[in-house]
């Protein structure tokens, strides 16, 4: 019996999800993404001819970023390096474009990444650092202590710097609060998931036992289906009913483990069930003695045939079950009698008996019932094949006789003997043929098993007919016979067509007659035009039947 193991139970929440591992993976992803983006930006600056100071700054940041990705450093160090790069890019933005560049974007990104990579407290510190940096560079630029490297950028007014700083503060507060709430909800969800997972772990233990039981049931059912399919496939190939029944009971007993399997077939009125095959030695002796059971409500045979249901007996003292064999078999612990059903008609019973106590559920009984139905269908098919073969043989005999009669009538008034000589082809009398047995070769013209003529060849004095020439002559004779039959059929078809055409023409002329006299004259005239008609009389009323070769005084 195959065994099935349940997949390992899910681990606890602490092992299935680790926030620290998630942050490490997140940091690795953003470092790689930043390196790729930095390479693209650095390449673009080189191609567009950016300032040397910008190129030095971006190149230095890119090199540090790549080294941070490639060198195995502690998590906190990599995170600080990434935050420092963001801060440096923000300062570079202030020096280059002041308030109008991307410096505030880098400061906001600094707050977000600090919250994600460390904690909301780190985000607060980053927000404070960013605010102080904005205020410092605003004072330096407004007091002209620092000049912007981009000449086309105005330093802006105090109100502009104040608005920019307050906007960054507001966005930082929103980001920090939002991320903090998300983290709290996430922790709560983790706790709930942990509780649910513990319940699942407990239920999975019970589920494993139930699945194992169900797996054993399915395995047994699958084995029964394979055995049933194997038996049905083997018996379906047989056309002899006796061989089919013997193989069916033997395979069923071997594959299903029954000590006795028997098949009974009913008579036409379903009054008597005749034993036709048995697997046990006692059953075979019963078969040799011509064992049969009369069907009545007191035994299994009558119950199964009347109710069209299987009968199960698990009691060795069951009187109804003992009547199945009339006490000739040993007492069994388990018995199943299944009807053989073909298109709603009970044709017999399949008796299954076991010495061991067995318990079959409804699905398994249905499988055995399906097997019995397949055997019944195979028996019916074998009977039909036998009947069909007998009908075909009878049809072939009738065809041969019909071919003989048709050609005898066809040749009654015909002399169809043609002879080919060096002087040409001519029609001769059958007795004028000079074929000799010494150098002659005769091949019958056979059509559907009937000889309708003869093809004769006369060779020269030293001619010896080879096997190849005989074979060729036989093939030619076959084709000649078919061609002759086709020609006869075509001739008969033409005659029928001419007769039908004549009938149609006479009918058309008669339909144009408006009175009785004209119709009778027309009928006599048209019938008189038919071949081999010498005289026509059309009489209306009672007339004495004429003797052959006499005339009538009626209308001519």
Image (spheres, rainbow, N blue to C red):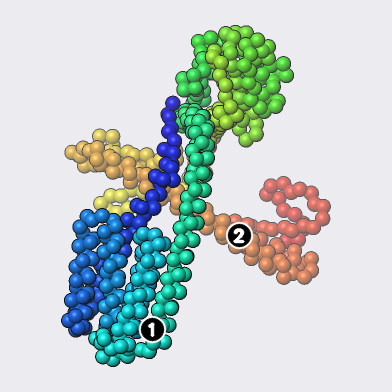
Label number found at residue 233: none
Viewer-proximal residue among 451 and 312: 312
Residue visible at 45% across and 53% down in the picture: 487
x, y percent for residue 102? 33, 79
Asked if one can make out residue 221 in the rendered structure from this viewpoint, the answer is no
Q: Quadrant of the C terminus?
A: bottom right
Packing grade of label 2 (10 A; few <14, some 14-19, many >=20) is: few
- What residue occupies the far right of the structure in this picture? 542
Residue visible at 72% across and 70% down in the picture: 512
Residue visible at 39% across and 42% down in the picture: 445
Residue 489 vs 212, above or below: the answer is below
Disc 1 element: helix
x, y percent for residue 11? 42, 41
Disc 2 element: helix
x, y percent for residue 284? 52, 12
x, y percent for residue 533? 63, 57
Viewer-proximal residue among 439 and 218: 218
Viewer-proximal residue among 26 and 298: 26
Label number found at residue 500: 2
Viewer-proximal residue among 258 and 325: 258
| Mark-to-mark CA distance, 2 and 1 | 116 Å
Packing grade of label 1 (10 A; few <14, some 14-19, many >=20) is: many
Q: Quadrant of the N terminus?
A: top left
Asked if one can make out residue 164 in the rendered structure from this viewpoint, the answer is yes
Label number found at residue 161: 1
Residue visible at 67% across and 28% down in the picture: 308
Residue 52 vs 262, above or below: the answer is below
**Would you identify the image quadrant in which residue 447 lies?**
top left
Contact (CB < 8 A) between labels 2 and 1? no
Between tags 2 and 1, which lies in front?
1
Residue 518 vs 76, above or below: the answer is below
């Amino acid at each position: 019996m195959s065994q099935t193991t349940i997949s390992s139970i899910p681990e606890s929440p602490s092992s299935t999800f680790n926030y620290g591992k998630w942050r490490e993976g997140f940091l690795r992803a953003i470092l790689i993404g930043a390196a790729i983006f930095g390479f693209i930006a650095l390449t673009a600056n080189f191609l567009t001819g950016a300032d040397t100071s910008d190129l030095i700054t971006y190149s230095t940041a890119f090199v540090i970023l790549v080294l941070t990705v490639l060198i195995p450093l502690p998590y906190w160090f990599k995170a600080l390096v990434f935050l420092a790069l963001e801060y440096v890019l923000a300062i570079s933005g202030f020096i280059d474009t002041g308030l109008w560049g991307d410096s505030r974007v880098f400061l906001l990104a600094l707050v977000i990444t600090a919250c994600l990579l460390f904690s909301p407290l780190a985000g607060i510190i980053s927000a404070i650092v960013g605010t102080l940096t904005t205020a410092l560079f605003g004072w330096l630029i407004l007091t002209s202590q620092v000049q912007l490297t981009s000449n086309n950028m105005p330093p802006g007014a105090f109100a502009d710097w104040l608005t920019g700083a307050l906007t960054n503060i507001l966005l930082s507060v929103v980001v920090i609060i939002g991320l903090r709430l998300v983290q709290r909800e996430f922790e709560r969800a983790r706790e709930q998931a942990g509780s649910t997972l513990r319940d699942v772990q407990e239920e999975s233990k019970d589920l494993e036992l139930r699945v194992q039981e169900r797996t054993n049931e399915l395995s047994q059912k699958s084995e029964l289906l394979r055995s049933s399919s194997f038996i049905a496939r083997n018996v379906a190939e047989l056309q002899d009913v006796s061989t089919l029944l013997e193989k069916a009971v033997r395979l069923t007993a071997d594959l299903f483990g029954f000590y006795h399997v028997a098949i009974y077939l009913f008579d036409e009125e379903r009054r008597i069930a005749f034993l036709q095959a048995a697997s046990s030695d006692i059953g075979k002796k019963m078969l040799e003695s011509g064992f049969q059971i009369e069907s009545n409500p007191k035994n299994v045979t009558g119950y199964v045939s009347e109710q069209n249901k299987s009968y199960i007996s698990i009691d060795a003292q069951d009187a109804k079950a003992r009547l199945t064999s009339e006490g000739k078999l040993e007492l069994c612990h388990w018995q199943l009698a299944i009807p053989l059903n073909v298109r709603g008609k009970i044709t017999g019973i399949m008796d299954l008996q076991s010495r061991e106590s067995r318990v079959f559920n409804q699905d398994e009984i249905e499988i055995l019932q399906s097997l019995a139905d397949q055997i019944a269908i195979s028996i019916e098919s074998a009977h039909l094949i036998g009947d069909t073969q007998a009908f075909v043989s009878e049809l072939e005999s009738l065809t041969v006789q019909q071919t003989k009669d048709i050609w005898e009538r066809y040749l009654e008034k015909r002399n169809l003997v043609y002879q080919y000589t060096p002087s040409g082809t001519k029609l001769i009398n059958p007795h004028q043929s000079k074929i000799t047995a010494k150098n002659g070769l005769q091949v019958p013209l056979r059509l559907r098993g009937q000889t309708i003529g003869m093809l004769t060849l006369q060779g020269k004095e030293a001619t010896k007919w080879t096997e190849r020439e005989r074979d060729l002559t036989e093939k030619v004779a076959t084709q000649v016979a078919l061609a002759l039959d086709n020609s006869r059929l075509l001739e008969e078809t033409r005659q029928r067509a001419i007769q039908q055409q004549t009938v149609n023409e006479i009918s058309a002329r008669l339909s144009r007659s408006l009175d009785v006299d004209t119709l009778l004259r027309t009928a006599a005239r048209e019938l008189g035009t038919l071949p081999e008609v010498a005289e026509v009389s059309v009489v209306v009323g009672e007339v004495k039947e004429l003797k052959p070769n006499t005339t009538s005084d009626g209308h001519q």
